[in-house]
Image (spheres, helix red, strand yellow):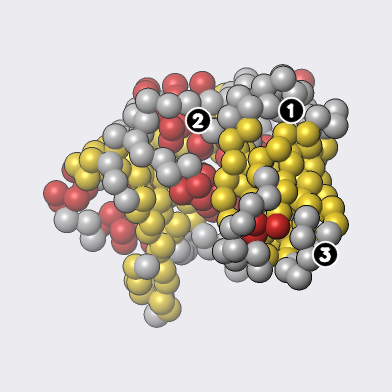
Amino acid sequence: MQQFTTSGATGYNLIADWPGGDPNDVLMLGGHLDSVSAGPGINDNGSGSAGLLEVALTVARQSFAPRKHIRFGWWGAEELGLVGSTYYVNNLPTAERSRIEAYLNFDMIGSPNAGYFVYSASGQPTGSLQLQQTLQAAFSVPTELTSVGGRSDHAAFARAGIPIGGTFTGAEVTKTAAQAQKWGGTSGVAFDRCYHRSCDTASNIDATALDRDSDAIAYALWTLADSGGTPPGPRFENLTDVTIPDLSTVESPITVSGVSGNAPSALAVGVDITHTYRGDLVIDLVAPDGTAFRVKTSSNDSADNLVTTYAVNASGEVANGTWKLRVQDVASNDVGRINGWSLQF
Ligand SMILES: [Zn+2]
């Protein structure tokens, strides 16, 4: 956490480095955490902050090991004049600046009347065609280029000579008829009519836009960090507690939607179960059509708790629909609960 002072108040940047990768070849991604004082700032910029956080968590879950070093930045006091990001860049030693190969910025990525904009490389002192084209390729919907000028936290990086890029779903500008035709939504209305207003609340988010742009962050990160791998697919989870009584069978559902085709040959099933004798547990993953895949049998394993990930070849199953984790306790005396489970496609 980096502290700075502005207008007599203390502000903070949060910088998170993912261990590993070449320290001389840093890919940095960021967005601002603060809002204007007029409103809660959920689209501007809870959306970008949340998208970056979800991608950072995915990096950790996948034990991502790319050639480049990955760094995330969540900036303070953007709305007061790009204060936090400017402080960060200005206080980086020259050698550290030269190690940052690119900076990607995400400010407003869930606008309620969303457009799909990618920062244009032209008109930027350090606009990068590679960054622009990678982000364009990340979308399955058509995108438009936007000239963001120096309007957000990429500005300080650009001034320092660092190539920049980013995405944006629109603010106070009105959506045209052609854009509404292309993207849906309402023409003649602003992309975000609650921009910098008190109504920029949790209901001021288009979840589809936030999902698409968050996927684009992941796609760009996986592509630019030189991982040699393909980006992960969507992840679904159910964190509802389910008690597992003795000698009984319980189930916890996850509904999957928006995934085309079949499940992967290594569907990752994350399991978090509290239990006082885990050898008692028999676990199946049940596909939407009722096919059961046994992932764990009972044994004499007397250890507590089961926190692990199983890979299931579910390539013969359609991905969309309701999957279930079926947990049986086949012995008495020890009980527990499902704390949560997940499916990573
Ligand atoms: Zn903003």
CA distance for labels 1 and 3: 30 Å
Query: Which residue is under mark 3?
Result: 245
What's the residue at 76%, 23% (across, down)?
318
Q: x, y (%) of residue 59?
A: 46, 44
For mark 2, does the 10 Å Cα neighbourhood hold few (<14), some (14 to 19), or many (20 or more) residues? Answer: some
* Mark linked to residue 319: 1
Q: Earlier in the sequence, mark 2 or mark 3?
A: 2
For mark 3, does the 10 Å Cα neighbourhood hold few (<14), some (14 to 19), or many (20 or more) residues? Answer: some
> Is residue 294 depicted above or below 133 in this figure?
below
Farthest front residue? Answer: 300
- The type of residue carrying mark 3 is Pro
Residue 277 seen in render: yes
> Who is closer to the viewer here, 242 or 35?
242
- The type of residue carrying mark 1 is Ala
Query: CB under 8 Å between callouts 1 and 3?
Result: no
Describe residue 342's horizontal placement relative to residue 21 as left or right.
Answer: right
Label 2 vs label 3, nearer the camera = 3
Query: Which residue is under mark 2?
Result: 231
What's the residue at 48%, 26% (across, down)?
230
